């Protein structure tokens, strides 16, 4: 429904805002408590399973960036390139895909994001989040 679509978009925007502000309390609330909650970062080593591990992943990212001199307690700005390219749902599950960019101190880096959300007690919670930085086919060892 349109209402679901708006709620899913709002949840994604809350994630972006929380990341920019290193708001770990909001991050904690946005992710599902499900033991299968999964975050796949853009680095091959970033495979994080479970709610607590996910929150720790964000806390570690914010601490790392803070140590690098980033403002807002190490917040990482993620900005959508114009809004989600797909939002859909079936019952208590929804998914969203977005093209966005990380705004790093050394320059902006485009990335793709997909998220799966689950309706829990009337709120959409992120149960799977996947970031990828596109690599041109010409850079692959074909």
Image: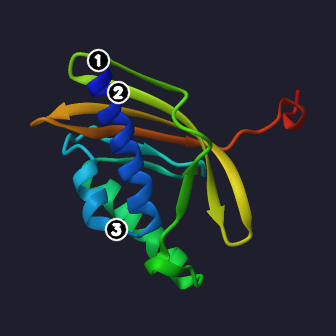
Vertical side of 2 occupied by 63: above or below = below
Mark 2 — residue? Answer: 5
Vertical side of 119 occupied by 106: above or below = below
Mark 1 — residue? Answer: 1
Q: Which of marks 1 and 3 is in front?
A: 1
Q: Which of marks 3 and 2 is in front?
A: 2
- Specify the quadrant of the image occupied by residue 77: bottom right
Looking at the figure, which quarter contains the C terminus?
A: top right
Q: Residue 37 carries which label?
A: none
Task: Write the residue at 47% across / 65% down.
Answer: 20
Q: Are marks 2 and 1 in contact (CB under 8 Å)?
A: yes
- Specify the quadrant of the image occupied by residue 92: top left
Mark 3 vs mark 2, CA separation in Å = 24 Å
Mark 2 vs mark 1, CA separation in Å = 6 Å
Q: Where is residue 64 in the image (x, y as percent from the top left)?
A: 51, 75
Task: Write the residue at 40% across / 70% down.
Answer: 22
Mark 3 — residue? Answer: 23
103 left or right of 12 in image: right
- Report helix, strand or loop for mark 3: loop
Pick the residue in front: 62 or 77. Answer: 77
14 left or right of 72 in image: left
- Report helix, strand or loop for mark 2: helix
Of the image marks 1 and 3, the number of the one nearer the N terminus: 1
Q: Position of residue 56 (x, y in %)?
A: 34, 64
**Tell me, what colour scheme is on the image?**
rainbow
Mark 1 vs mark 3, CA separation in Å = 29 Å
Pick the residue in front: 135 or 20. Answer: 20
Q: Do the residues labelled 1 and 3 touch (CB within 8 Å)?
A: no
């Amino acid at each position: 429904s349109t209402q679901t679509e708006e709620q899913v978009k709002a949840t994604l925007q809350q994630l972006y805002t929380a990341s920019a502000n290193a708001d770990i309390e909001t991050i904690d609330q946005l992710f599902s408590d499900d033991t299968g909650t999964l975050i796949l970062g853009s680095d091959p080593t970033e495979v994080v399973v479970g709610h607590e591990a996910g929150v720790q992943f964000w806390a570690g990212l914010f601490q790392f960036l803070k140590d690098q001199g980033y403002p807002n307690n190490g917040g990482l700005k993620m900005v959508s390139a114009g809004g989600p390219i797909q939002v859909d749902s079936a019952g208590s599950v929804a998914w969203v895909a977005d093209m966005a960019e990380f705004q790093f101190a050394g320059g902006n880096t485009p990335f793709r994001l997909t998220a799966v959300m689950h309706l829990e007690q009337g709120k959409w919670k992120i149960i799977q989040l996947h970031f990828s930085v596109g690599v041109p086919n010409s850079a692959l060892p074909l």
